[in-house]
Image: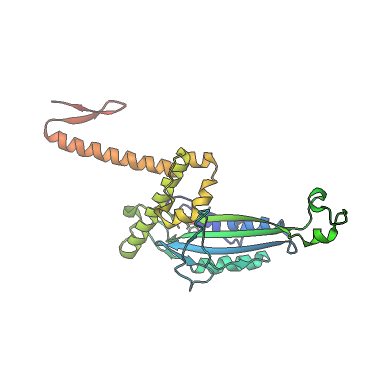
Amino acid sequence: MAYGQTGTGKTFTLGKLGEEDIAARGIMVRAMEDILADTSPTSDSVSVSYFQLYMETIQDLLFPGNDNIAIAEDPKSGDVSIPAATVVEVRDQKSFLELLRLGDAHRFAANTKLNTESSRSHAILMVHVRRSINGRNDSESSFPSDNGQSSSLVKSLRPPIVRKSKLVVVDLAGSERIDKSGSEGHMLEEAKSINLSLTALGKCINSLAEGSAHVPFRDSKLTRLLGTHLESLPAWVAQDNSMKKEAFSSYWLLSSLYLWLSSLCLGGGGYKLSWTGSWWSPVGG
Ligand SMILES: Nc1ncnc2c1ncn2[C@@H]1O[C@H](COP(=O)(O)OP(=O)(O)OP(=O)(O)O)[C@@H](O)[C@H]1O
């Protein structure tokens, strides 16, 4: 998951196709290269879905007509999925690059003061890998038939084991200081929506890091979608995240503003604040 201020290179790092310069391939392309190198078309299947979360709607980047996909939730397990998202089987790197190119062409971006191609949506790439395991070890596969001998027929009738795994790559839209990005009108609404969902994400990560009994996954679609994946974040990621630092700087900013306002109000009554070297303290009468 790439998180950071607008213009810091998230999309560049994750999504670059690297067609002109192979050394500039992004993480999505490199990850798929590794997966394809480690899978076999006879026993494995690799498929992808690619969608964006734009102003609290989920849109299919591989089939743009599918522009308001619902989230489904298993009432028993609580697992979240998006069944209507297009899933495309990937056979080789070339077909994957074409899918990425198609998806990127439909991603919302805008020219702001901080980034000429600022993403206005969060993009989520899901890679599903299924591997059929045909053979089982002897103790599992040979069990007696009626005549007391192990039956190869029974063995062959047993369903194959299928191992499933999933890679989720998230290119978050950048957090944005409106005064710096100069967003107005519709772009301002986009920026508000981006910042709100990032705040919801930060709250979930903090709750997970603190081991809270309640994690507010339901506060936004982004956190609903990523919920189960966030739970598997290693503890050090959750504890050393820049979102915490950002929350701290917002607190610091508000505290400074409060001190400054206090000094203005108190100044009229004969008070002034002076820096003692470690803290502001009131001086004068
Ligand atoms: N490592 C890099 N080397 C060269 N150019 C870079 C690098 N990282 C980013 N850039 C350039 O910086 C600009 C901003 O990068 P990018 O769009 O990836 O930022 P971002 O973090 O995704 O921004 P936003 O959150 O607004 O979408 C782009 O023009 C990109 O080509």
Would you say 204 lies left or right of 153 here? left
Q: Is residue 254 above or below residue 174?
A: above
Would you say 147 lies left or right of 82 here? right
- Closer-to-camera residue (214/142): 142
Q: Where is residue 101 in the image (x, y as percent from the top left)?
A: 56, 67
- Residue sitting at the far bottom: 65
Asked if one can make out residue 96 in the rendered structure from this viewpoint, the answer is: yes
Q: Position of residue 104 (x, y in %)?
A: 52, 66
Total numbered badges shown on the rendered structure:
0
- Closer-to-camera residue (86/215): 215
Asked if one can make out residue 1 in the rendered structure from this viewpoint, the answer is: no
Q: Which residue is drawn at 44% across and 41% down?
A: 213
- Its colouring scheme is rainbow
- Closer-to-camera residue (266/163): 163
Q: Which residue is drawn at 60% across and 61% down?
A: 18
Q: Which residue is drawn at 77% across and 58% down?
A: 134
Would you say 36 lies left or right of 263 here? right
Would you say 49 lies left or right of 113 here? right
- Residue sitting at the far front: 146
- Closer-to-camera residue (60/278): 60
Q: Where is residue 88 in the image (x, y as percent from the top left)?
A: 61, 68
- Residue sitting at the far left: 269
Q: Where is residue 24 in the image (x, y as percent from the top left)?
A: 59, 56
Quadrant in which the C terminus is drawn: top left
